[in-house]
Amino acid sequence: MAPIAEWLFFFLIFPGLLFSVLLGLVLVWVDRKVTALVQWRAGPPPGQPFWDVLKLMGKEVIVPAQAWAGGFLGLPFVGLAAAGIAATFVWVAAIGIAPSFGGDLIVVVYLLVIPTLAVIMGGAASGNPLGAVGSSRDMKLMLAYELPFVIALLVAVFQKQEIDGELVRAGTMSLSGIVEFQNDAGSILLRPSGAIAFLVALLCAHAKLGFVPFDLAEAECEIGEGALLEYSGAVLGLFKITQAVLLATLPVLLVTVFWGGLTLTTLGVLAFLGKVVLILVLFVLIKNTNPRVRIDQAMRFFWGPLTVLALAALLLAHLGL
Amino acid sequence: MSSPTSKRVVQIGPFHPLLEEPVGFSLGVEGETVVDVDARMDYIHKGIEILAQQRTYDMLPILLERICGICSVTHSVCFCNAAEDLLGVEIPPRAKYIRTIIAELERVHSHLLWVGLAGHFIGYNTVFMWAWKYREPVCDVFEMLTGHRQNSALPMVGGVRRDIPVKYFDEARKTLDMVEGKTQMLTDAVLDDPVLAARLKGVGVLTPEEVMEWGVVGPTARASGVDTDVRRDEPYAAYDELDWEVCLTQNGDVFDKAVVRLLELKESIKILRQCFDRFPEGPLNLGTLHIPRGEGVGRYEAPRGEDIHYLRSNGTNMPERLKVRAPSYTNIASFKASCIGEKISDVTITLAACDPCYSCTERTAVVRAGADQPERTFGDLVRLSQAETRRIAAEMGRAPDLQLT
């Protein structure tokens, strides 16, 4: 296949949009089922997230009179496309089916911001005051968690390896480089610096997914879904799908960067999926044992303790620990 | 109340995920800070008071049970207190204990319901599900003893209508032991949780002065350290014979309002155990009573605070006037004191923290016509809605579903 056709296939079918959406919806089901078990409920059947999205796709799309229609309807597509490309890069690097280019980690970090930006701008474009409140909260939250998130990912880049009795910085800015490094030197997660950075990145990813306690941008009891308030029908469905793609991407990104890539054996695939589900269950448990925090508390949390922890991890990585 | 003066208004209600019933709050906001709050409580006015004037005294407790979905015992017993105040009679001991038992069971399930809802409002759905799971057996006990999980139809003027089966007391004790353990667990969880403390402490504070000024009642007042409880101050039913305490906390914030309710839960369970142990023999009621001309006032400590019924009788078998003042009616007004200056995210939990029951509270309201809005009578509104129905039907190309005049 020509490279372009190959990458189109990667992006549209596997491991990009189609695969991520399906996997994401399965993971949404895992989330809902585990939540239900924690709360002593039965929970939905496995097909429920699919039916939910399918139902939304068939519903009428209502554009509020005061909304900027172009942005309101266009932004969900931008968000989904960005999430799809991010998923493609992360999975391609994790599986190693194609060589990734140097610096794709930076590209992925940028791409993962875009779905959140789409929600923020969509909420602002809806012209609803509650949507505006949701957007402003989402923006503050994003500013808060991106800083420790990026520092935590840098810890993986700054890892050092002992070669011939000398500490050499072996990490690169490319995801496949980080995976290769871990194949040689073991999981970054097992080092002190890696463990701290993983914890920080996990909490930032939790906020990125908009889960309780960091769901203040949606907070249905306060601002009634916030930025998504005016969305209905297929465009709302697109945001839900984007959310599912992120759910299928962020745990994989965490596993790839901190916990080794995917080896294409039965055991390897099972171990990889196990790690992803484990991270997902961690998300669900954090989500179900905490009340929602206020936006100022969230910002203080991310810019305070988490940034300090991430910087400490970076220092440890520099010392070769 | 005046309408908010600031530029931006965040509307909570009349239908909103925060509200289990329709009520309208307009929050005037600057950024995320609330600078004004206005309430409209006229969406589900049921006209109970006029209905009450068309019912005999025997039928009234049954009607009044339906004022509120949660406090069914509250309003019927409060009315009986008013009628018995008018008559100047004392009810038989067994009736007193039966009223106490159903009243405290109601308080237990009402407080558990609030704990769950409060959890939901701050995004803590696990607490929501767990609290309601523990509430369910309490409703089952209520059903075992009275035949229905909400509306017992037990109270009547001069006593109670039916007996409650003593054979189920053991089962009820077991359920109470379970609920007490779980309440302890919830209390410990609330007191120890740093995130909950960060989220709820210092939020929506009512000072004791504000409590007095706004006439706040019930657990909302007791959370501010104001020592008020009708059960002790003007005992009805069997409360003066039992050993229990009024629970108080000092800070008046949402955290303390939660704690005071959890403490009250345990106190209610203590009262229930004593009632089961000391349950007396004797008649259930005073038989048929003629209610003479006169007026009486009933006070009752509902789960949400002091409920007052005013009854005026003209000597017939129906009241001339029955006035209900539910506890939420005064508590809701205190939002002016507790919400202004808070953030939107804190206001929602503050609104919920007095456990408002809008169904008991709603009144008819006159919405004044503005300059651009003509004043319309009921007939005008009927004609307008019929014209609209005709227009929609014509658009769909078929005759209206209903026969229009």
Image (cartoon, helix red, strand yellow):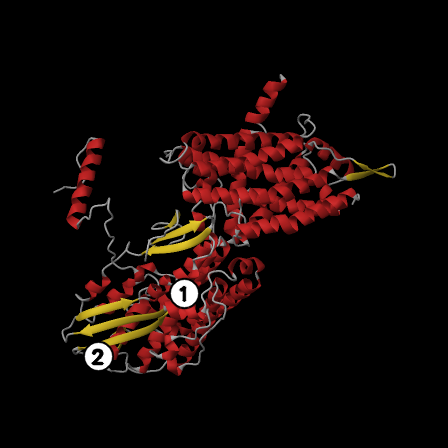
Say which element carries label 2.
Answer: loop
Q: State whether residue B273 is above or below residue B389.
A: below
Give A304 or B218, whichever is nearer the viewer.
Answer: A304
Label 2 neighbour load within 10 Å: few <14, some 14-19, many 20+? few
Question: Where does the image place residue A5, in percent across and percent down from the top left?
Answer: 59, 19
Disc 2 chain ID: B
Q: State whether residue B193 is above or below residue A311.
A: below
Give A37 or A193, whichever is nearer the viewer.
Answer: A193
Given the current orientation, which residue lies at the most extreme left position?
B405
- Number of numbered discs on residues: 2
Which residue is tagged 1?
B109
Q: Nearer the viewer, mark 2 or mark 1?
A: 1
Which residue is tagged 2?
B287
Question: Where does the image place residue A77, in percent across and percent down from the top left?
Answer: 49, 30
Residue B218 in sight: no
Q: State whether residue B65 is above or below residue B298.
A: above
In primary-sequence order, the first of circles 2 and 1 is: 1
Residue type beneath disc 2: Gly
Residue B63 in sight: yes
Question: Where does the image place residue A97, in percent across and percent down from the top left?
Answer: 66, 27
